[in-house]
Image (cartoon, rainbow, N blue to C red):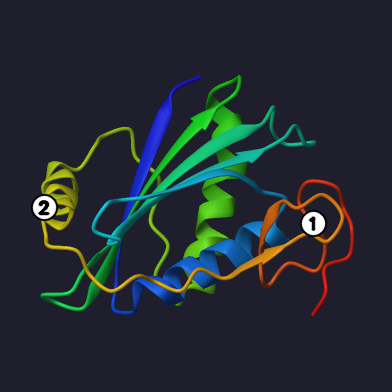
Amino acid sequence: MGHKFGYYSLEMSLEEVLNRTHSFWANNSGKINSQIKSPNSLIYTLIIQRDISMMSYGETYTMKIGYNPDNATTYVSVEVALSFGYGMQWLKPQGVIKRWALELGTNPMKLERTIAPNYIKMFDEIQNMPPQAGVQEPIIYCPSCGKKNNRNNTFCQECGTKLPE
């Protein structure tokens, strides 16, 4: 088991990063189990679960996405935890994060075992900034079960019902 980390700086809005990240996970077998917004609406923490596949026993991705309005940059911290395994089991999450990075138009980085203190400091600074205008979350409710879904999803992540356009 274990954890690995990746860090990204993106010159795009928080809303765009959130929209593209939701769309990515909806199309790549990731179930967003929770999304937590900071009181100042500048940091979102997503917890994503991917189940067992031919290459993996499952992974949990924790993505912390924070926007710094002072420099118009969105920072992303990715923590990946394997459900079971080591060694070759890291190939799958490394490939998933590489595809996510490419979809967001940035260079992929190798997941590392070390935490970057400068990113922890950056998120602390963003957390302490005054409240900002809220980000429009791309949400649609399932007509069948009522679960919140990403507006870009075609089907409900909870029950599989086709969502209205």
Helix, strand or loop at disc 2?
loop
Q: CA distance from mark 1 to mark 2?
A: 35 Å
Location of residue 107 in the rendering, given as x and y in whole percent from the top left corner: 39, 69
Query: Which one is nearer the viewer's eye here, 33 or 77?
Result: 33
Query: Which one is nearer the viewer's eye here, 113 or 145?
Result: 145
Check disc 1 and report the residue beneath it.
156
Q: Is residue 29 left or right of residue 105?
A: right
The numbered dot on residue 57 is none
Image quarter (top left, top right, bottom left or bottom right) of the C terminus: bottom right
Label 2 crowd (10 A; few <14 / some 14-19 / many >=20): few
Q: Is residue 133 left or right of residue 29?
A: left
- Label whose residue precedes the other's in the sequence (1 or 2): 2
Kind of residue at badge 2: Asn
Kind of residue at badge 1: Cys
Location of residue 54 in the rendering, given as x and y in whole percent from the top left corner: 80, 36
Q: What residue is rendered at 58% in x and 52% in y?
A: 95
| Residue 106 appearing in the image | no
| Residue 61 appearing in the image | yes
Q: Locate residue 23: give its quadrant.
A: bottom right
Query: Which one is nearer the viewer's eye here, 62 or 132?
Result: 132
Helix, strand or loop at disc 1?
loop
Check disc 2 and report the residue beneath it.
128
Label 1 crowd (10 A; few <14 / some 14-19 / many >=20): many
Location of residue 118 in the rendering, given as x and y in whole percent from the top left corner: 12, 49
Q: What residue is rendered at 53% in x and 62% in y?
A: 100
Image position of 49 with respect to 81: above or below: below
